[in-house]
Structure formats: structure tokens, C-alpha cells
Amino acid sequence: KSTRSTNSSAPITTESTEPHVSPAEFLSVTYYHVAAILDPADEASRQRRLCDSLCLGGRLRVCAHGLNGALTGGAEAVRQYIEWVEERHEPRPQRAIDWKLAPVSGSELFVGLSVRETAELVTLSPGSPISPLEHTAPHVSPADFHRLLEEEAVRDPSAPAGNPPPLVLLDVRNGYESAIGRFEAPNVATLRPPLRQFSELPRWLEANVHVLRGRRVLMYCTGGVRCEAASVLLRQMRARGGEGGGEGGGEEGGGDGGSEAGGGGGGGR
């Protein structure tokens, strides 16, 4: 994801940051972008004006450390929005925006537009907002996500504990999402916090820190942003001595395939 294609009709590849826009009349686009936003109020105003001019509907969060949005509209309007964001924010190769596009019908378009200035990319810790700009865990590609699970599946459980530490799989989605489908692998404990909403995760982690102690934490969500925030939270717990994860106590990560104790993704999308 390090180069930008100049052909908007080219298929999606791992080398291009510009997604393929299908011939569908309407599209949905979801994304998040971790970056320093120096003036969130101004950014929110610019985003609102652009979305209004393009007749896009949906929800967008703007905060000091990035953008998080889900929008729908005409295919050409969505393409123009993507180009505007890419040109305005010029994401670095290591922080390329993972635009997720899907065709929708006219009856599936969002009604109305909400562009809000918020404290966090995703609500997690209102008392002390989590910023993924620093201390987020390494991202893990889909291929590495599955490789880690496969390696753990053949680990000899009778062998003495060594390096790397045992792996634990953490689903940071809401309970109803994990009930529909989830990852499971031999020899890997899968943790499914019974969350009604993401903001309940800190309390669950505090109560279950002993389960994560001394383990690598491989986490996943649907789009990545929740893993970004959760990885920061785990690392903060480690820094306080909770050993919830991180180097030494259990790696945190994630990414397009998940986070090895941190960043997020659809576990292998």
C-alpha cells in the first residue's frame, strides 16, 4: 500500500492506495485515518461542506488524531470524496487509508449527514481519550495473522514455555457481532468479551487482565479502528504494571488482518 494509482478504474491491489470504483450507481465507503488534525473544528467544517456539495450522507467523526467515517452516495461523488481526502491529508505509506467500498441501492443510502468533532476516533475512554497516534501496536497483515494462528496450532503444549509466549486471540467487537462469526484456532484461547458497546472494553480488560498476562495478544475487529484504540489501552495497562499485553508481557498487535496486540482489521480481510 505504498503507491497511488492514477487510474481510478484499476482493480484494488496491495500496491495502490486508490480503490477501484465499481460501475454501480451508488456506493458506500467506510474508512478511518490516523493522523494529527491540527484544527478539528476547521476540518469538520470543510468535511461537512464537501459532503453537502457531493450529496453524501452518513456519519463522520473528526478529532485531533484522525477521521472515522461511513458515507453513501453516487459513485462519482464517492470517488471525488476519496480523492479530496487523499490529496488533503497525503497519508504516509505506513498509514495508507484502507478505503472499503461496496455497491448499495438507492433505498440503502444514509438519510442525512452527521459530521461531529469528537474526543476520540471511536468512543472508548471518555475520562481520558485514547489517541492511536502514539503507542499503537504493530499491524499484522492477513497472511501473517493466519500464519501466527497456524504456528500456534502446531505448538507442543507439553513443551516448556519459551519465546515467543503463548498466543491469545481477542475479539474486540460487540457481542452480537462475534455471535454471528468469529475466528477460532487449535491451541489458541479465543476471548469474546460480552460487550454491548465498545466503551465497555476497559472494564472487561481490567477484570480479565490475568488471562492476558504473559501472552501475546492477537486481536481483530471489523474495520480496524477499534483494534487501534484497544491496543493503546492494553499498552497503557502494561505501563501501569497490569501486564495486559505488550512486549515482555504479551505482544499487542493488529492491522489489516488483525493486530498482534493492537491494530485492527477484519482478522484477515
Image (cartoon, grey):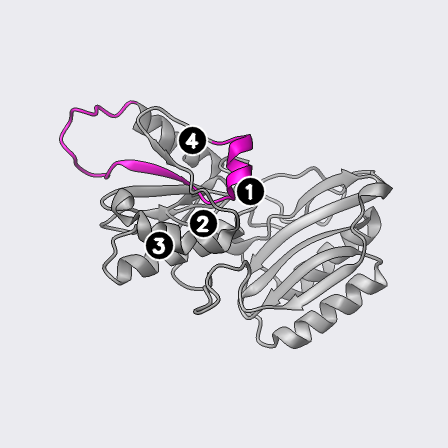
For the question of whether residue 102 can be seen, the reply is yes
Quarter-of-image position of residue 189: top left
- Mark 3 residue crowding within 10 angstroms, few (<14) / some (14–19) / many (20+): many
Q: On the image, numbered disc 4 is attached to which residue?
A: 146
Q: On the image, numbered disc 2 is attached to which residue?
A: 263
Residue name at image x 82 percent, y 64 percent? 52
Percent across and percent down for residue 117 are 63, 70
Callout in the foreground (2, 3): 3
Tag 3–tag 4 contact (CB < 8 Å): no
Percent across and percent down for residue 12 are 66, 39
How far apart, in angstroms, are the residues tagged by discs 2 and 3? 11 Å
Callout in the foreground (1, 2): 1
How far apart, in angstroms, are the residues tagged by discs 3 and 1? 19 Å
Q: Which mark is residue 17?
A: none
Q: Amino acid at mark 1?
A: Thr
Q: Which mark is residue 234?
A: 3
Q: Is residue 167 magenta?
A: yes
Q: Amino acid at mark 3?
A: Leu
- Residues in magenta, as a range: 154-182
Q: Amino acid at mark 2?
A: Gly
Q: Closer to the camera, 245 or 83?
A: 245
Tag 3–tag 1 contact (CB < 8 Å): no
Callout in the foreground (1, 4): 1
